[in-house]
Image (cartoon, rainbow, N blue to C red):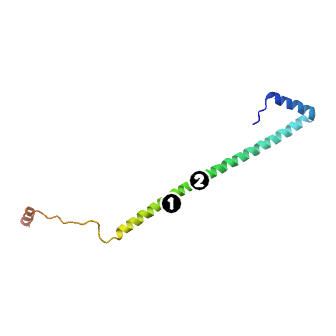
């Protein structure tokens, strides 16, 4: 977090000893530790909230993409149903059935069989 080396920390401790005094230094160190811990917990809480908010926005984006795909599929399905309904409404078939004429030899075989 901070780039504090050994010598900088040593100088801060010596100055705190001179300014605060040896009898009040332990209590001041405890108080400073308490507030530093509280600040770290607060920062971690904010980080977690931001991370969860990004996760929620990611989920919302995924849901939006899925809804878009569902809408596209529904429109394609509606187009298919409409096309099939138009095909069923036509009264005349698009093809013509032709009867196959049998050969004369087959007619004679059919007469003999009767």
Residue 29 appears in the figure: yes
Residue 22 visible from this viewpoint? no
Tell me if label 2 and label 1 are in contact, CB under 8 Å: no
Place of residue 71 in the rendered image (x, y in percent of width and height, measured from the top left): 51, 60
Q: Which quarter of the figure is the C terminus placed in?
A: bottom left
Quarter location, residue 11: top right
Q: Is residue 38 above or below residue 56?
A: above
Return the x and y of residue 21 as percentages of the image width and height: 93, 33
Name the one closer to the observer, 18 or 33: 18
Tell me the number on the disc at residue 71.
1
| Residue under pointer 2 | 61
Looking at the image, residue 68 lies above or below residue 7: below
Which residue appears at 88% of the width and 38% of the height?
28
Q: How many marks?
A: 2
Q: Residue shown at 44%/62% (left/top)? A: 77
Q: Residue furthest top?
A: 7
Q: Is residue 81 left or right of residue 68?
A: left
Where is residue 97, by image quadrant?
bottom left
Whole-percent x and y of residue 109? 8, 63
Q: Residues within 10 Å of mark 2 (few under 14, many from 20)?
A: few
Residue at 26% across / 65% down in the picture? 95
Q: In this rendered view, identify the residue nearer to me: 110 or 63.
A: 63
Q: Please tell me in which quadrant of the rendered image residue 84 appears.
A: bottom left
- Residue 68's place in the image compared with 86, above or below, is above
Q: Nearer the viewer, residue 27 or 103?
A: 103
Mark 2 or mark 1, earlier in chain: 2
The residue most toward the bottom is: 91
């Amino acid at each position: 977090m901070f780039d504090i080396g050994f010598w900088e920390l040593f100088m801060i401790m010596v100055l705190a000893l001179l300014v605060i005094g040896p009898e009040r230094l332990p209590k001041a160190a405890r108080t400073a530790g308490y507030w530093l811990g509280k600040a770290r917990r607060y920062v971690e809480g904010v980080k977690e909230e931001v991370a969860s908010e990004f996760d929620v926005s990611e989920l919302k984006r995924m849901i939006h993409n899925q809804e878009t795909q569902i809408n596209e599929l529904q429109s394609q399905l509606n187009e298919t149903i409409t096309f099939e309904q138009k095909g069923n409404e036509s009264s005349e078939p698009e093809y013509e059935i032709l009867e196959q004429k049998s050969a004369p030899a087959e007619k004679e075989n059919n007469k003999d069989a009767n």
